[in-house]
Image (cartoon, rainbow, N blue to C red):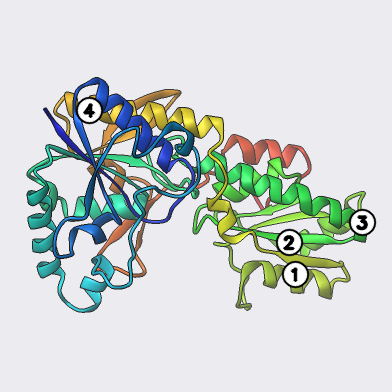
């Protein structure tokens, strides 16, 4: 009987429990045992591995579609982790402890459900997982992982942000004002772009597209309403100004005589019951991960490419996209997917009269 481990790392999102539940379902059909690692890598560096046996009684179907992670994602204050190991110059000690702890679990394979930082870290420290198969499943509301057309949690985050904008639009109309909504997404504008369109934004500013603040002001003054949504990704910058992006844009609008308020949905973008499309993706990626284990694959990530679920090498993932240094872990390079200039949503938004920056 194969012994499979599952852990979630990095920021949470909706869809994690759906993936875990489907892994349990698929593993049970194969007569494999599934163990959940609590608190990610944090749960592996205590006095003993913090793991539990998983089955449908532990995680029943009615709890599989709620937000967050049943296993928790780590960053526990009293535990060590990769970031603290770097800060205290105890990286080698941490790596040895992690490898030893994993060996104690006697796992045949580990399914790591994480974002681009987690995947990059896993590849950089791949020797830690050399005694087992390592399969990664991409999850993030940012949609910034290369080589996959969709990540677990993105669609639910779009839905959450869209609902937020729907409610704001009503009060915006009542008071003849604009709302500058700041989305998450880090340095990728996919969430802001998608939710901006579905939320009816009149302007969308993302990190990948340069914008002219004067042209933004001119655009807002030219539309045929005196209220609406301006979606701003947290990753944008405005030369000569500091602070939160939404605040910077708001000040410019106020100076131009445009009545506005800022709105910060913050971590509610990570919340909400998992939407059907994320539930379907979770099932497909869980199935692909289990099939990869059965096929003796290792150091691979499940990916959606052209409506097909495939596996790609983690080495290919981390060598693709735009490379940048991790702000917290020295010598860790993270590869980011970004919104391209020829993205169909950008083209369509521009054709619909939404200001999206200087794309030409």
Q: Are marks 1 and 4 in contact (CB under 8 Å)?
A: no
Which type of secondary structure does the marked residue at label 4 adopt? helix
Observer able to see residue 319? no
Query: How many residues crowd around disc 1 within 10 Å: few (fewer than 14), some, or many (20 or more)?
Result: many
The residue carrying mark 2 is 180
Q: Are marks 3 and 1 in contact (CB under 8 Å)?
A: no
Which type of secondary structure does the marked residue at label 3 adopt? helix
Q: Is residue 103 left or right of residue 197?
A: left
Nearest to viewer (mark 2 / mark 4): 4
* Residue in the foreground of this view, choosing between 136 and 305: 136
Which comes before the other along the chain, label 2 or label 3?
3
Estimate the x, y position of residue 149 in percent, counting from the top left.
45, 34
The residue carrying mark 1 is 250
Which comes before the other along the chain, label 1 or label 4?
1
Which comes before the other along the chain, label 3 or label 4?
3
The residue carrying mark 4 is 292
The residue carrying mark 3 is 174
Q: Are marks 3 and 4 in contact (CB under 8 Å)?
A: no
Q: CA gap, disc 1 to disc 4? A: 49 Å
């Amino acid at each position: 009987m194969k012994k499979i481990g599952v852990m979630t790392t990095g920021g949470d999102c909706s869809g994690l429990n759906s993936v875990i539940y489907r892994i349990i379902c698929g593993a049970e059909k194969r007569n494999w045992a599934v163990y959940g690692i609590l608190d990610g890598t944090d749960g592996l560096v205590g006095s003993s591995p913090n793991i539990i046996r998983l089955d449908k009684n532990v995680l029943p179907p009615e709890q599989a579609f709620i937000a967050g992670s049943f296993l928790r994602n780590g960053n526990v204050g009293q535990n060590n982790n990769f970031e603290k190991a770097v800060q205290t110059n105890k990286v080698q000690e941490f790596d040895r402890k992690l490898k030893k702890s994993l060996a104690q679990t006697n796992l045949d394979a580990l399914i790591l459900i994480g974002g681009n930082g987690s995947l990059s870290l896993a590849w950089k420290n791949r020797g830690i997982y050399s005694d087992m198969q390592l399969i990664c499943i991409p999850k993030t509301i940012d949609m910034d992982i290369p080589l996959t057309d969709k990540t677990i949690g993105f669609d639910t985050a779009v839905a959450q942000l869209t609902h937020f904008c729907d409610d704001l639009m009503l009060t915006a109309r009542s008071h003849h004002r604009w709302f500058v909504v700041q989305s998450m997404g880090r340095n990728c504008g996919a969430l802001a772009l998608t939710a901006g369109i579905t939320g009816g934004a009149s302007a969308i500013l993302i990190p990948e597209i340069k914008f002219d603040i004067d042209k933004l002001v001119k655009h807002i003054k030219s539309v045929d309403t005196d209220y609406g949504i301006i979606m701003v990704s947290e990753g944008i910058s405005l030369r000569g100004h500091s602070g939160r992006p939404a605040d910077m844009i708001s000040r410019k609008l106020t100076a131009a005589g445009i009545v506005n308020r800022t709105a910060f949905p913050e971590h509610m973008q990570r919340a909400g019951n998992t939407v059907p499309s994320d539930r379907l993706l979770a099932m497909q990626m869980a199935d692909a991960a289990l099939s990869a284990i059965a096929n003796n694959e290792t150091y691979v990530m499940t990916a959606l490419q052209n409506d097909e679920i495939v596996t790609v090498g983690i080495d290919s993932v981390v060598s693709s996209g735009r490379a940048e240094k991790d702000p917290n872990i020295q010598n860790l390079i993270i590869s980011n997917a970004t919104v391209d200039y020829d993205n169909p949503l950008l083209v369509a938004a521009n054709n619909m009269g939404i200001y999206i920056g200087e794309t030409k």
